[in-house]
Amino acid sequence: MPTAVALVPARSGSQRVPGKNLLPLAGHPLLAYSIAAARESGVFDAILVSTDSAEIGAVAERYGADVVRRPAELATATSPDIEWVRHAMDGRSEELFSIVRPTSPFRGGATIRRAFERLLELGDRADSIRAVELCKQHPGKMWLVEGDVMQPLLEQPDTGTPWHSSQYQALPRVYVQNSSLEIAWSRVLTGSASIAGERVAPFFTEDLEGFSIDYPGDVERAESLAARLPAIAHPLAST
């Protein structure tokens, strides 16, 4: 089996949900769920938390992860992933890396293992695998406002019913990425501005695997889900 490292990004400056990486969920900080999932998967040789915060780093170590102190210039709201990933991977030799973001607390070890096995199964046909789900708001029904009128965001079919006037079920199936999981061969970091490479395979998340805490209302929903469905909150729910 190829060597692999889990990278958990946890910068301190979240704007939409301040302090989200340490928000409590079912008695544990949000960050802890991704560390636990990475460990539970059994596929990683190391689990690294990349952070610019001493407080976050201390929590990460308490839950069993190693810490990479991220420079402030790589921890801004607009810093691209490729920068902190390269920083975390500098000097490391693992053949694969996975980004396991703290914002997806219901993505467990079995989810990671399923994606990992799928990427290995694909072999040279894929550089990476990324979590996706069916989009709820189809881009065929999206518009650009130009002055007093609108134009469809996407080019519409030459004949037949325009997408913006079609039923959802009649439209092409379109998937949107969610932030729950990415796994890539480390070779993609060489001479590229992408953490995914050119050949990106889909990993179809199921049920709550792709749930992400990105807005204040998501915190309340996560608390409600954790209370009603403790079994999905993996080992931390019972400790």
Image (cartoon, rainbow, N blue to C red):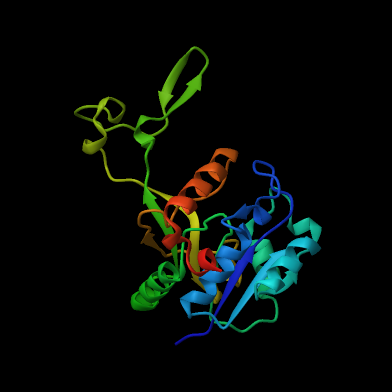
Is the C terminus in the top left, top right, bottom left or bottom right quadrant?
Answer: bottom right
Q: Nearer the viewer, residue 1 or 158?
A: 1
Q: Nearer the viewer, residue 113 or 106?
A: 106
Residue 3, image x, y percentages = 52, 84
Is the N terminus in the top left, top right, bottom left or bottom right quadrant?
Answer: bottom left
Residue at the farthest left position: 160
Q: Quadrant of residue 22?
A: bottom right
Q: Residue at x 45, y 59 (%)?
A: 230
Position of residue 230 relative to residue 236, above or below, is above
> Image check: 51 left or right of 32?
right
Residue at the farthest bottom position: 1
Residue 97, image x, y percentages = 55, 73
Residue 95, image x, y percentages = 54, 81
Q: Residue at x 47, y 75 (%)?
A: 41
Q: Residue at x 47, y 58 (%)?
A: 106
The answer to whether residue 197 is seen in the rendering is no
> Image check: 91 left or right of 212?
right
Q: Nearer the viewer, residue 192 or 118?
A: 118
Total of numbered circles in the picture? 0
Position of residue 39 relative to residue 103, above or below, is below
Position of residue 119 relative to residue 200, above or below, is below
Residue 148, image x, y percentages = 49, 12
The answer to whether residue 115 is seen in the rendering is yes
> Image check: 175 left or right of 62?
left
Q: Residue at x 51, y 50 (%)?
A: 212
Q: Quadrant of residue 200?
A: bottom left
